[in-house]
């Protein structure tokens, strides 16, 4: 087992990985979010991570209470978790992890620290869209993320995508060479992802005539349309998060 530098603290030992990677690293995609609700854009991003980056394992981690945004208050954590599991059905590389769903806000850096400590042979590859990347400098604990993971940013077209200080850009060709992958690298992937967001779906449900059977067709996983629509169009119900 690989061990990096060891920092001793009272009643606890934290293992902080050094700049040297494990001899047999396992690259695992990490895809977190509120999934309020999950949609086919989420699924497509994960499919592209498998196709473009060759990831053999991706962990989808729904947030209980998010750090950087607010929940709609309509769907319960149990509903969101069930929807996420249904959305990613049939993708053998995907495992849905419920680690954070019943917890209070867990920043990404806490997840990375835990992974680095408990699973030192795993190299996390944080998967995100362009919007998340544009706000990463405001994440709690930043820029420690550069020491603990790689990042893959999936964006549409050839628009500007800044490279922030401390990150090293990696090309698709470099990514294909495992020995060149190091923490602190970011790869930008131009892909065709459906232009849909959870916010747009909730807005669509509230602004378009209720009862339309075609309202969410092609936006969410087939068979989930009516259930998702019923949850978000009901103005009388809500979920209290503490």
Image (spheres, grey):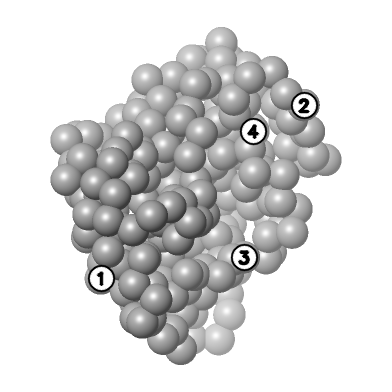
Q: Residue furthest right?
A: 165
| SS state under label 1 | helix
Instruction: Give the CA distance from mark 1 to mark 4.
Output: 35 Å
Q: Is residue 145 left or right of residue 10?
A: right
Instruction: Give the CA distance from mark 3 to mark 2.
Output: 23 Å
| Residue under the image location 59 percent in, 29 percent down | 155
Q: Earlier in the sequence, mark 3 or mark 4?
A: 3
| Residue under the image location 77 percent in, 33 percent down | 163
Residue 178 is at least partly visible in this image: no
Check residue 78 in the rendering and tell me which mark sits there, or answer none.
Answer: 1
Density class for disc 4 (Cα within 10 Å; few <14, some 14-19, many ≥20) is: many
| Residue under the image location 64 percent in, 44 percent down | 131
Q: Earlier in the sequence, mark 3 or mark 1?
A: 3
Residue 198 point in image, percent of width and height: 46, 52
Instruction: Give the CA distance from mark 3 to mark 1.
Output: 21 Å
| Residue under the image location 43 percent in, 52 percent down | 208
Q: Quadrant of residue 51?
A: top left
Residue 152 point in image, percent of width and height: 55, 33
Density class for disc 1 (Cα within 10 Å; few <14, some 14-19, many ≥20) is: few
Q: Is residue 121 left or right of residue 211?
A: right
Residue closer to the observer: 20 or 43: 43
Density class for disc 2 (Cα within 10 Å; few <14, some 14-19, many ≥20) is: few
Q: Which residue is mark 4?
A: 185
Check residue 174 in the rendering and tell me which mark sits there, or answer none.
Answer: none
Labels 3 & 1 near each other (Cβ < 8 A): no
Instruction: Give the CA distance from mark 3 to mark 4.
Output: 23 Å
Check residue 68 in the rendering and tell me which mark sits there, or answer none.
Answer: 3
Residue 159 point in image, percent of width and height: 73, 23
Determine whether 148 is above or below 142 in the image: above
Q: Earlier in the sequence, mark 1 or mark 2?
A: 1
Q: Earlier in the sequence, mark 3 or mark 2?
A: 3
Labels 1 & 4 near each other (Cβ < 8 A): no
């Amino acid at each position: 087992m690989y061990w990096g530098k060891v920092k001793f603290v009272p009643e606890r030992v934290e293992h902080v990985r050094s700049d040297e990677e494990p001899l047999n690293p396992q690259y695992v995609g990490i895809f977190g979010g509120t999934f309020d609700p999950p949609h086919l854009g989420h699924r497509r991003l994960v499919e592209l991570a498998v196709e473009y980056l060759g990831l053999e394992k991706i962990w989808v981690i729904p947030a209980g209470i998010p750090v950087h945004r607010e929940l709609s208050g309509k769907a319960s954590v149990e509903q969101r978790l069930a929807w996420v599991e249904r959305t990613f059905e049939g993708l053998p590389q995907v495992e849905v992890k419920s680690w954070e769903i019943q917890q209070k806000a867990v920043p990404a850096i806490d997840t990375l620290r835990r992974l680095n400590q408990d699973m030192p042979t795993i190299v996390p590859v944080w998967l995100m869209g362009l919007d998340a990347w544009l706000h990463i400098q405001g994440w709690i604990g930043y820029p420690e993320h550069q020491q603990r993971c790689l990042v893959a940013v999936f964006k549409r077209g050839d628009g500007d995508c800044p490279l922030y200080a401390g990150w090293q850009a990696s090309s698709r060709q470099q990514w294909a060479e495992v020995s060149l992958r190091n923490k602190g690298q970011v790869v930008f992937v131009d892909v065709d992802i459906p232009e849909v967001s959870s916010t747009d779906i909730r807005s669509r449900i509230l602004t378009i005539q209720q009862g339309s059977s075609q309202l969410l067709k092609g936006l969410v996983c087939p068979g989930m349309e009516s259930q998702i629509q019923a949850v978000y169009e009901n103005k009388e119900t809500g979920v209290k998060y503490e």
